[in-house]
Image (cartoon, coloured by chain):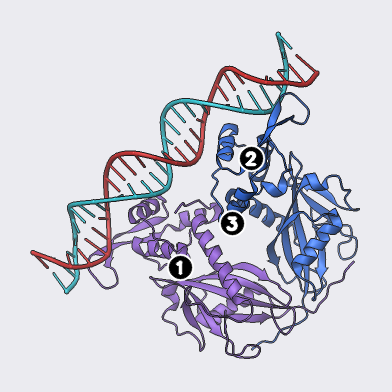
Chain colours: A blue, B purple, C cyan, D red
Amino acid sequence: MKAPDFSAALSTSLMIFAFDGDSVLYLIGRKKSEPYSGASILPSTYINVNESCEDVARSMLSDIFKTEHFYVEQLNAFPRKYRHPEGRIVNIAHFVLVNWEEISETELPEGYRWVHREEHNEMAFDHNEIVAFAYERLKRRVRHRPMGFYLLPKEFTLKEIRQLYEEVLQRPLDKRNFQKKFTRSELLLPIDKKVIAAYGNKKPSQLYSFDEQQYATMSIKGYDFKF
Amino acid sequence: MKAPDFSAALSTSLMIFAFDGDSVLYLIGRKKSEPYSGASILPSTYINVNESCEDVARSMLSDIFKTEHFYVEQLNAFPRKYRHPEGRIVNIAHFVLVNWEEISETELPEGYRWVHREEHNEMAFDHNEIVAFAYERLKRRVRHRPMGFYLLPKEFTLKEIRQLYEEVLQRPLDKRNFQKKFTRSELLLPIDKKVIAAYGNKKPSQLYSFDEQQYATMSIKGYDFKF
DNA sequence: TCAAAAGTGTTAATCCTACACCCATGC
DNA sequence: GCATGGGTGTAGGATTAACACTTTTGA
């Protein structure tokens, strides 16, 4: 019978997604200390043995964004033996969705920036693997549960939500079919009378918000949106 | 800047599913040492810092079953602070599918037994939580990827595969619709001429096996079976 | 009045669901 | 020859995919 070997360490990296109205972005940082000083990394920190992983993840978020309005779930553990040169450090990565509306005003701390999926960074450790894993999850999530609540502004147009889905799925979606599906889904409430012009030009469009009741139900029960 | 705190330990628990032709079962063991000696647990072991989690999981499987034919994936990390009385031990649980045909002959080591979902055991640590989490994953998996390959004998009847799906989804499925769906899916190859009686009685039924080519494709691409 | 994006319906094909009887065989 | 489970088809409704023009407004 084996005994516990109390000589591993824990860390967490955050895969933080946001949607700026146009693109899906994720946040990267820059390593300030050795090893790999200067390299791109996901926002990460070590976890002391007396700390809860999720609490540490949340407090890192609140350090970065000065707000608390996040969706956080465990992404996966990345436990490979030689992922970290200083010893056995198991990374319990988290999957985070943040609302651009709430954080775009706040200046990011030194070294952090938002990047697109396409601009591939060589990141330190196994962080590129974590990024890929997270994108896969995001893609699946969008088909089986509502997700917009955490990524869209409180009030949004159908164009925006479609743009979000196209970005996540990396595929154009038929405008009419998409709108039908969403308006029939009962997730959306048209905001009465309120209309507002889109970003630069022309005709104003209808704004919607989420029906929180329905949204909560659908988050639990899940659904199968076919796109 | 935090430094790594090399005083956590790692363990892994296995949620091992099998299908005996009638029910979905999972394997439990009995704790032989303190803490919680005598309690029911999932098959578990500590991981030394120089060991790979998945390797340890696989070698535990091979100790139990004397064979290697398994599907293994990471289930989740269970990292709660006070889940283990002896210190911070993060459990990286694995999700395993074993083929009843290959292991039902082998005698299980002392203390292990197969149980049904329904007979709920109070298990030590957070193992009941792990079980619940694994059943949720199994339910989702079955809708989005083929799964029978790891759980069914090499040659099986449509009745058996339907029985498996009904067990996993905990819901009766229409015989005709189910058979249509599967025979159309191109996953199954009828085994020419070969027919064999079911367990005790009456008319023999057609045997099928998986088209490994299609199966592999579908495993990667996924699908959406609506049940 | 023109340019730009918003909004909107129909059709054909596919898929899902519900449902019941005949057949082949072992006993 | 009969009891048992194996095997099979259809019809109605719902959902999807493909597709283009009109409306509203700001400039």
Give x and y (percent) for residue B63. 55, 82
Mark-to-mark CA distance, 1 and 3: 28 Å
Viewer-closest of B31 and A115: B31
> Within 10 angstroms of label 3, few (less than 14), some, or many (20 or more) residues?
few
The numbered dot on residue B58 is none
Labels 2 & 3 near each other (Cβ < 8 A)? no
Q: Nearer the viewer, mark 1 or mark 3?
A: 3
Give x and y (percent) for residue B193. 27, 60
Where is mark 2, residue-wise? A189
Tell me: A114 left or right of D7. right
The numbered dot on residue B151 is 1
Q: Is residue A125 visible?
A: no
Q: Residue at x 59, y 40 (%)?
A: A182
**Subunit bearing disc 2:** A
* Dot 3 amino acid type: Ile
The secondary structure type at the circle numbered 3 is helix
Above or below, A218 against B19 in this view is above
**Subunit bearing disc 3:** A
Viewer-closest of C27 and B121: B121
The numbered dot on residue A220 is 3
Mark-to-mark CA distance, 2 and 3: 19 Å
* Dot 2 amino acid type: Leu
The secondary structure type at the circle numbered 2 is strand
Viewer-closest of A82 and A28: A28
Residue at the front extreme?
A192
Above or below, B174 against B114 in this view is above
